[in-house]
Image (tube, helix red, strand yellow):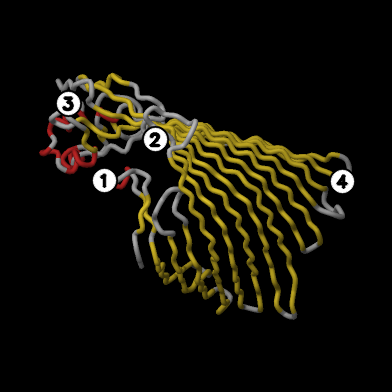
């Protein structure tokens, strides 16, 4: 167990207890409980007070059974369950350049209701079986469930009171948006109309599940040793967006809810993915030389289901967009022991990332090269030259990069080195 404390109400408490006991002459039974708590009041300062920190509770429970040492056929079965909750009083709202220079840790009153709440659960079952002294088959089935709602300021009323203006636009040119800036900062005496600030509930649910088997075998061919891995995996996941916008009045630094939006009226859609993956990798050792070639194949099917937002309805979709990818991904790495303490390294690997469901962006593809040396003697030194050569870089629009586009949309960034 460990307990740490620090500034700004920082606390980290971590503990674990567990072990194995004999269950007859051939089997052992084990278990473990691991608990973690982290919290902080945050180092930023809200204009009207309040927490800018976080609170996290994480628990992991494991149960296992395995053969005792010396068994004819070694195997083990392990069940793991993890549950996590998090509350983070965090925001994307920044500061004007002048306000940042005066106090970089300030947070405007317009971000006072920003908060992210997360609940996450993982269930995983792993079976390991030694088919022979040098052959092992490990199979893992898994499921992850995550609900995440980041409730955060999206935009502010414009000076004319006729529409909304983005936060980054206001902060980039505050002189052009004095009324919106006053609402955002909650300046003394500022009372906006009932439509002063719009806060978005980015409510999403994620599910991913699948099963993977890895067969590992070790053998020699003459004076060359091999460690061969063969793997197959089936995976599926989904993202469910059911978001709304709430509207607030700014009243002398205090945000007051005037209109609660309808769940699903801002975004009402489901993205789904299904994939098969296979790979083979061989670690080949011959004297001072080690070469590791590998090849991966993936077949990915994506689908986005768009539902009506006005009014929100899940009885029938407005559109369904489907895409798919089949890709071969090769790679090879090599090391050479130049001396007892000097290792030469090199590698070339294909990179691939598919766009999300419903995106019209091209996949991200690249070749990645590296070469150099490592020295591990009296001191440790490493020098590596590398090149990431993208045929196409896949980009995503995020609020943290300033917005100016539809958050979550992906785009083709083109060739990049």
Please report contact status of discs 2 and 1: CB closer than 8 Å, yes or no.
no
Q: Earlier in the sequence, mark 2 or mark 3?
A: 3
| Quarter of the figure that contains the C terminus | bottom left
Q: Nearer the viewer, mark 2 or mark 1?
A: 2
Q: Nearer the viewer, mark 4 or mark 3?
A: 3
Give the Cα separation between the discs numbered 1 and 3.
26 Å
- Residue at 44%, 64% (x, y): give it: 365
Q: Nearer the viewer, mark 4 or mark 2?
A: 2
Q: Earlier in the sequence, mark 2 or mark 1?
A: 2
Q: Earlier in the sequence, mark 1 or mark 4?
A: 4
Give the Cα separation between the discs numbered 4 and 3.
73 Å
Please report contact status of discs 4 and 2: CB closer than 8 Å, yes or no.
no
Kind of element beneath mark 3 = loop
Kind of element beneath mark 2 = strand
Mark seen at residue 404: 1
- Residue at 34%, 63% (x, y): give it: 414
Q: Residues within 10 Å of mark 3 (few under 14, many from 20)?
A: some
Report which residue position mark 2 lands on.
Answer: 267
Q: Earlier in the sequence, mark 4 or mark 3?
A: 4
Report which residue position mark 4 lands on.
Answer: 26
Give the Cα separation between the discs numbered 4 and 2.
56 Å
Kind of element beneath mark 4 = loop
Report which residue position mark 3 lands on.
Answer: 187
| Quarter of the figure that contains the N terminus | top right
């Amino acid at each position: 167990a460990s307990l740490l404390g620090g500034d700004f109400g920082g606390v980290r408490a971590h503990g674990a207890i567990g072990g194995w006991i004999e269950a007859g002459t051939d089997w052992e039974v084990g278990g473990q409980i691991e608990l973690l708590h982290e919290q902080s009041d945050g180092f930023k300062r809200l204009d009207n007070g309040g927490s800018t920190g976080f609170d996290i509770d994480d628990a992991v429970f494991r149960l296992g059974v395995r053969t005792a040492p010396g068994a004819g056929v070694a195997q083990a079965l392990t069940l793991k369950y993890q549950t996590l909750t998090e509350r983070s009083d965090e925001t994307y709202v920044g500061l004007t350049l002048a306000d940042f220079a005066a106090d970089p840790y300030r947070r405007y009153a317009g971000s006072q209701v920003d908060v992210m709440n997360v609940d996450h659960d993982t269930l995983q079952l792993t079976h390991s079986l030694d088919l022979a002294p040098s052959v092992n088959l490990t199979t893992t089935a898994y499921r992850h469930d995550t609900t995440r709602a980041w409730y955060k300021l999206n935009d502010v009323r414009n000076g004319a009171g006729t529409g909304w203006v983005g936060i980054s636009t206001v902060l980039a040119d505050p002189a052009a948006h004095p009324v919106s800036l006053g609402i955002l900062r909650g300046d003394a005496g500022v009372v906006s109309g009932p439509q002063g600030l719009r806060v978005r509930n980015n409510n999403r649910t994620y599910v991913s599940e699948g099963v993977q088997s890895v067969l590992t075998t070790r053998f020699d061919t003459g004076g060359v040793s091999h460690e061969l891995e063969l793997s197959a995996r089936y995976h599926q996941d989904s993202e469910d967006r059911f978001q709304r916008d709430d509207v607030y009045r700014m009243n002398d630094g205090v945000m007051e809810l005037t209109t609660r939006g309808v769940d699903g009226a801002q975004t009402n859609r489901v993205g789904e993915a299904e994939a098969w993956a296979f790979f083979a990798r061989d670690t080949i050792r011959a004297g001072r030389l080690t070469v590791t070639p590998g090849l991966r194949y993936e077949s990915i099917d994506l689908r986005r289901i768009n539902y009506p937002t006005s009014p929100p309805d899940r009885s029938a979709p407005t559109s369904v967009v489907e895409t798919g990818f089949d890709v071969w991904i090769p790679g090879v790495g090599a090391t050479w022991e130049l001396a007892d303490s000097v290792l030469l390294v090199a590698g070339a690997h294909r990179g691939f990332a598919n766009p999300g469901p419903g995106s019209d962006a091209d996949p991200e593809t690249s070749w990645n090269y590296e070469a150099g040396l490592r020295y591990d003697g009296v001191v440790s030194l490493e020098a590596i030259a590398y090149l990431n050569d993208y045929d196409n870089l896949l980009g995503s629009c995020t609020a943290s990069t300033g917005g100016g586009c539809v958050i979550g949309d992906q785009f083709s960034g083109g060739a990049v080195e």
